[in-house]
Structure formats: C-alpha cells, structure tokens
Image (cartoon, helix red, strand yellow):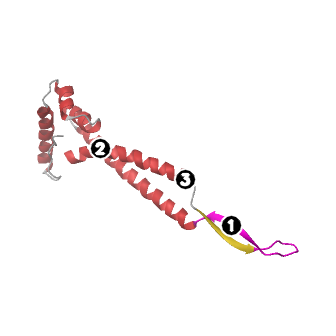
Amino acid sequence: MTIKDLDEYLDLQNEIVILNERLEKLKNNPQSLVFDTVKGSSREKPYLQRAVTVTGISQKSIIAQKQLESILRQRISRHQQKVLEIEHFIDTVEKSDIRQIIDLRYIQGLSWLKTAKRVYGHSSDDRARKALTRYIEKKEKERGGADEACCCDAV
C-alpha cells in the first residue's frame, strides 16, 4: 500500500456516490421515445387515407442505456474493491498511532496539522507525516519494495 493509494480513498468514496446517483437517474429517466407518421385508413368504408402518429422506444437507446448501466456498475464494483483493500490494509497496521494517522488524514480528510494535534497532542504536522512515511518505507523494505515509492504530500 502506498501513500498514493491512501490518497485515493476519499476520491473513491465520492466517485462511488456520484456513480450511484448517475445509475439512479438512468433508471428513473424514461427511454428515448421515437415518433413517426404512417399512412393508414379505417377498417371500414369509407377507406379514407389519413396520417397516423406512431410512438415507441428506440431499440438502440435501450441497448445503449443497458451498456452504460453495466459500465457504471463495473466502475462502482472496482472502486468498492479498492476501498476494501485500503480498509484491509488499515486493519493490518499493528501500531495504533499509524492507524489513527491514516484514518484521520486519509479517511476523514483532516490536514496534517489537525491529524498531528489529534494523535500526538501538539501542533507539529511533521511528526505525523514522518511517522507514516517511516512506517510505509519499513513495510516496503520488508516486502522487497514491490510497490512504487511513497512520500507524504505537504498539503
């Protein structure tokens, strides 16, 4: 797990909400209606020709909507899986202060300064950032450095 992965958490959660809203709109939005005019007459005499308007739902529209719904569901599923991976990673962190830092900074979206105040009780944001960076680097060394480099942003 990298800092970049943790940074994605809130964005993934927001995107899941947005995608679910789009899905709901698609479900509640009527299909595209098509209109056409044909010529016809009554079944009985006098057989006078007249124009008749015919309406229906476009088959192409139905297919396109179902494809879009499928794509949106797949994206939601991928994002939910990534969120679960991040939550699982947090669950495996042995150190309480590191779990708190991750939760406050990346899950709740607090600044580094507010995170440091909550975890360590003082106003130096460097301590929280450095503690997390060291922890991630240590884990990478233990695993052989398979993931990309990690570094905390100053934001």
How many numbered badges does the structure rendering display? 3
Residue 104, position in %: x, y?
25, 33
Classify residue 116 by image quadrant. top left
Distance (Cα) linking label 3 and label 2? 30 Å
50 in the magenta segment: yes
Residue 127 is left or right of residue 18, and the answer is: left
The mark found on residue 9 in the picture is 2
Residue 134, position in %: x, y?
11, 40
Q: Nearer the viewer, residue 19 or 91?
A: 19
Name the residue: 68% across, 71% down. Answer: 37
Sequence-earlier tag: 3 or 2: 2
- Crowding at mark 2 (Cα within 10 Å: few <14, some 14-19, many 20+): many
Secondary element under disc 1, as helix, strand or loop, is strand
Disc 3 and disc 2 in contact, CB within 8 angstroms: no
Classify residue 32 by image quadrant. bottom right
Residue 76, position in %: x, y?
40, 50
Q: Which of marks 1 and 2 is in front?
A: 1
Residue 57 is at least partly visible in this image: yes
Residue 143 is left or right of residue 18, and the answer is: left
> What residue range appears in magenta?
40-58
Secondary element under disc 3, as helix, strand or loop, is loop
Q: What is the residue that sits farthest to the top in this orientation?
A: 121
Image quadrant holding the C terminus, namely top left
